[in-house]
Every structure is written in C-alpha cells, then in structure tokens.
Amino acid sequence: MTTLTRAHRELYRRTPDEMFGSLEELSNHCQAQMEKSADRWHKPEAMLPQSNDRFSLTLDTDGQFGLNDWSFTQLCQLARVNRDTVNRLTPATARQVFLETLPDKGKPLQFYTTDGLIRSIHGAAYTRLYNADLLDLIQETAEGFEPPQTAQGGGSGLYAGEQDMFVFLIDPFGWVEIEDQAFAPGFFVWNSEVGRRSVGIQTFWFQAVCSNHLVWDAVEMTEFTRKHTAHVHDSLEAIREIIASLTAKRDARKDGFARVLRQSMNTTLGDGNDADEALKALTKHGISQALAKKALDIAKEHGRFTIFSVVDALTRISGESPFAGARFEADQKAGALLQMAA
C-alpha cells in the first residue's frame, strides 16, 4: 500500500484565492475565465516590447498586454535570455534586451489573453484543453464523488490558479472490503490551459485521508497523462472511461459488500444467545480473550451474537482506541470475521 502525496503538495502551494468550496463553484470560475479569454495569433515580428511603468508587449493592432509570471518565463525562453537576469533590470533595459533577442521572423505564435494580460505564449504545435470542458466531464461521470474534508488552512482539494487546475474527489460512502480491509475510491485530476503541466488523472482506493490531505494506504492506482499536442482532446474520452471504470468497480464491490453484510446479520456465533459459546468462537478465530469479551459486552445491545453485531462492536472499539496498534488489531479481526459470512 502507498501514501499518495499529490493533494498534500497542492494544498501547501495554493493561495486562498486559488481554493474553491465546491465543484460547481470551481466549474463556474473556469467557465467564466474561458468565456473572457481569447487566442491571438501573431508573427514574431508583430511583438513590440514596451517599458512604461512596467514591462509589457504590444501585439500589432490588438493593443498592449501585460505578462504574468508564466508568460514572462515563456517570453524569456523564446528570446533565449536568462529570466532571473532580466528580472533584475529596469523595464527600459529589459525592453532593449528583448528588442535585440526576440525572433523577428518565423511561424505565427499563439498568445492566450485574458483581461489585458497574456497568460501564455505557444507555437503552432500546442493545443489547448480548457479546464471548463474537463470539469463538465467530471460532473457528468463522477456520480457520488465529492471533495474530502477541509484541510488545515482551509484547503478544499479544489484549486485553480493562473497556471493550472487540480481536483481531488472521493466517494465518502463508497467503502468496501478489499482483502479483509476497508477501502473507498477516489481520484485526482489536473490540467493546465497554459501548458504548465499535462492533463491527467490518477484513480485509487484508499483507507484514510488526513487533515493535510495525505492519502493513506492507497491500492489499485491507475494513472493516465497526455501532453497538450494535436490529439489532447482525445484525453477527455480516456478520462471519461477511467472514471466510468472506477464507478463501475465501486458499484459492483458495494453490491457484493452489501450481500456480505446482510448475510452477517443472519449468521450467529453458536446459537446467538450463549456468551461463553460466542467467546469460544471468537478466540478460535484468533481474537484475544480481552478483546473478545469487550466486543461481546457491546454486541449484547443487538440482542443476539451475530457476526454483524461483533464486527460492529470491534469497529466501535477501534474508533475509541488512542493506540494505532489496537486500532489495527480490531480492524483486522473485524475484516476476518466478515469473511465468515461471505
């Protein structure tokens, strides 16, 4: 089993304005951003560096645009100059550097702009995949999935900034038994409209998500990524199929688990009424006398000593214990008992 750290890293690199409280809120934000953005195609010689109060670019008749951190980095790469060096220069000196180093011929470039700001600069080979389109797909296919509990500092697992988007969703009611232990399904999805990272998805089954969004004891991980080239939109169908596969497996496992639970409610330890007989049955299955007696005292609330009543008792004991070792033993024994009813 593996500890997944993607959501943890995202949590601690995001600012409050990049955090969203719901998938709908994030989707509305990305939709609005897409609607007010535009691709502008210009030949390299149409770029004219400017140096008023701050450095900017004039794009032929489209007007003057500012740059953010990412598009400025791309401009430096295009000019083949060191970004850190240029950042130490005055706007006027920086303008002169770019006048002398930017290409003055070649294939047209695509400038992705929003509200007078250049968000990215790419060549003709780059193909944009909008965050809004990816979120529409998730909302259509990921039935039952929602963000995890709010993390320390208010992190929601739903993030979008000027460079990229990240989504962390789980099914909090999708718990099933896998090899005698409880797991629930979840997935990460990421994308960048400006080429900062690939588009991708990772699905998994996990046992716990802690308050800093580390995903503990993950199994059955599946990952898919695609670069933003000519066929990047094909990734939407691939991601749709991956989420559909995860939900189908969740539903099948939940149905199987529900059958086991129903059977466990009708399977007694002995005749279901004799505590000594139930105690012998539990110790025979490797449960210590102390743990068995404690579980049977709680199980009496159900009226009969069924496998379900004892598993419920062991689960409650696990939740109340401050010691990881004791919790693990109780959870392990509960899972083994359920298999008796399978």
Image (cartoon, rainbow, N blue to C red):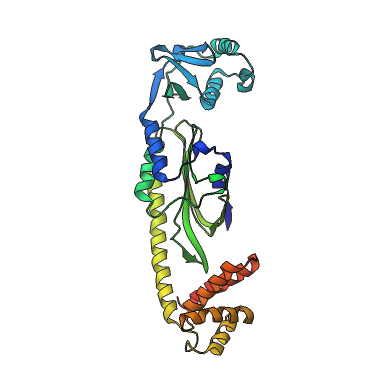
Side (left or right) of 319 relative to 173: right
What percent of the width, then of the height, locates residue 7? Answer: 54, 46
Side (left or right) of 236 relative to 296: left
What percent of the width, then of the height, locates residue 145? Answer: 42, 53
What percent of the width, then of the height, locates residue 121? Answer: 47, 23
Of residue 321 and residue 200, the one placed in the foreground of this image is: 321
| Residue 232 can be seen, yes or no | no
Of residue 193 and residue 28, the one placed in the foreground of this image is: 28
**Does residue 246 lie above or below 340 as drawn?**
above
What percent of the width, then of the height, locates residue 85? Answer: 64, 19
Of residue 173 and residue 341, the one placed in the foreground of this image is: 173
Side (left or right) of 255 relative to 162: left
- In percent of the image, x 60 and y 22: which residue is there? 83
Of residue 255 and residue 330, the one placed in the foreground of this image is: 330
Q: Quadrant of residue 79?
A: top right
Side (left or right) of 311 relative to 242: right
Q: How many marks?
A: 0
**Does residue 315 lie above or below 192 as drawn?**
below
| Residue 78 can be seen, yes or no | yes
- In percent of the image, x 57 and y 45: which residue is there? 153
- In percent of the image, x 54 and y 15: which residue is there? 54
**Does residue 179 lie above or below 210 as drawn?**
below
